Image (cartoon, rainbow, N blue to C red):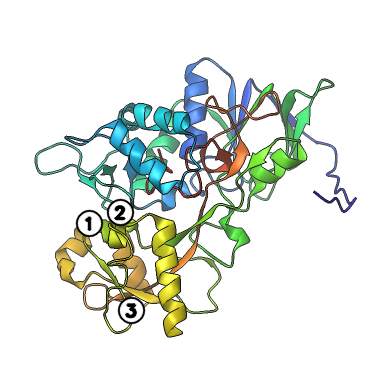
Amino acid sequence: MTSTGIRLHAPAPGWALDADVVVVGSGVAGLTAALRCEAAGLRTVVVTKARLDDGSTRWAQGGIAAALGEGDTPEQHLDDTLVAGAGLCDREAVRLLVTEGPDAVRRLIATGAHFDESTEGGLALTREGGHHRRRIAHAGGDATGAEISRALVEAVRARGVRTVENALVLDLLTDAEGRTAGVTLHVMGEGQHDGVGAVHAPAVVLATGGMGQVFSATTNPAVSTGDGVALALRAGAEVSDLEFVQFHPTVLFLGPDAEGQQPLVSEAVRGEGAHLVDADGARFMVGQHELAELAPRDIVAKGITRRMQEQGAEHMYLDARHFGAEMWENRFPTILAACRAHGIDPVTEPIPVAPAAHYASGGVRTDASGRTTVPGLYACGEVACTGVHGANRLASNSLL
């Protein structure tokens, strides 16, 4: 790595808090970690760059994958994950994920998250790309992340976990031996503290999410700028697989000059039977993969891009007109509203879609306990590289 020799030094911290653990980030990873630390009797502080619910979690539409359905097993979930990861997953990390997954979903329900139920009364499960079974639990039709975020934010507030909002973490503090001693942060605008401060703690958990905003078109919110990976690199932690940025195949196409966060059209739409077609209405994923439109994301994104290049087109289409108005309104209300806000009615016309940057499969390297190579520094969620995702994440393994 080359160095410019330029170091930007923040002013000395003007205020400080003490804690046993500081969690950086307030998505499903950070808030879950904070609740578990608090339950273990640790003084826990959550710091987050904007508001508690401003991260990627609340934008997750499709759902959360776990072997919860009849006839499904962790072993089958493992196989689908390994295939999607293109031979680069850590098998033992995946085994841990799929085995502990069902209980993790039940814990979310116990925390207060309400998932959609089938007419028989169990969880309603859907299918997404790369899955050979219906194993994705969802909420509010296509508002799973928003419901999980709501439940976790409420739980954090109810249990009185200390939070500092509008706080950009700058650097890791370390002691003379190089062990973690906390973080410095800059509170911007509306915070209860002002300016540069510090949270002193022997353990720091990075849960800062992804880096989609590095790309001109992404599904990620404005806060996903890779801060956690940057902090870890400056602290000397190992990072891994940063080149594996997953592009989501079906993002609402808003024009060639559209920048920033673009509306996602969940894979669950294809899971329920929507087809990818070109301008002539021809399906082009059939014959490219046994799962056609439900192949793993890298394969579908490449299939769309290839057809766009062949035809000199700026986008392809997702056709779900056969769902009818009632199914669109009940099952995919968020996506329906987003499309209509941009002048497209999926009930009567195909949706223009193109791939956009979606998920960082790599990140700060951790072991199975979330430990990085810097003593006292931990990472979880999208900022971490646990070996679970390999070269391409399986749909709905992210919330899990």
Q: Which of 387 and 237 is in front in this view?
A: 387
**What whole-number distance in Å separates the C-alpha atoms at marks 2 and 1?**
7 Å
Residue for badge 3: 278
Residue for badge 2: 142
Q: In this view, does 304 lie to the left or right of 160?
A: left
Q: What residue type is labelled 3?
A: Asp
**What whole-number distance in Å separates the C-alpha atoms at marks 2 and 3?**
25 Å
User: Which secondary structure, mark 1?
Assistant: helix
Asked whether disc 2 touches disc 3, contact meaning CB atoms under 8 Å apart, the reply is no
Instruction: Specify which label sits upstream in the sequence, 1 or 3.
Output: 3
Instruction: Specify which label sits upstream in the sequence, 2 or 3.
Output: 2
Looking at this view, name the residue that lies furthest to the top: 41
Residue 147 screen position, x and y as percent: 35, 44
Which numbered disc covers residue 331? Answer: 1
The answer to whether residue 251 shows anywhere in this view is no
- Asked where in the image residue 174 lies, by quadrant, the reply is top right
Q: Which of 377 and 170 is in front in this view?
A: 377
Q: What residue is shown at x 28% (from left), y 46% (from top)?
A: 139
Instruction: Specify which label sits upstream in the sequence, 2 or 1.
Output: 2
The answer to whether residue 59 shows anywhere in this view is yes
Q: The C terminus appears in which quarter of the rendering?
A: top left
Looking at this view, name the residue that lies furthest to the left: 120
Q: What residue is shown at x 36% (from left), y 32% (from top)?
A: 98
- Asked where in the image residue 95 lies, by quadrant, the reply is top left
User: Which secondary structure, mark 3?
Assistant: loop
Query: How packed is label 3: few (under 14 Cα within 10 Å), some, or many (20 or more)?
Result: many
Residue 143 screen position, x and y as percent: 33, 51
Q: Is residue 295 left or right of residue 6?
A: left
Q: Which amino acid does label 1 sit on?
A: Arg
Q: Which amino acid does label 2 sit on?
A: Asp
Asked whether disc 2 touches disc 1, contact meaning CB atoms under 8 Å apart, the reply is yes
User: Which secondary structure, mark 2?
Assistant: loop
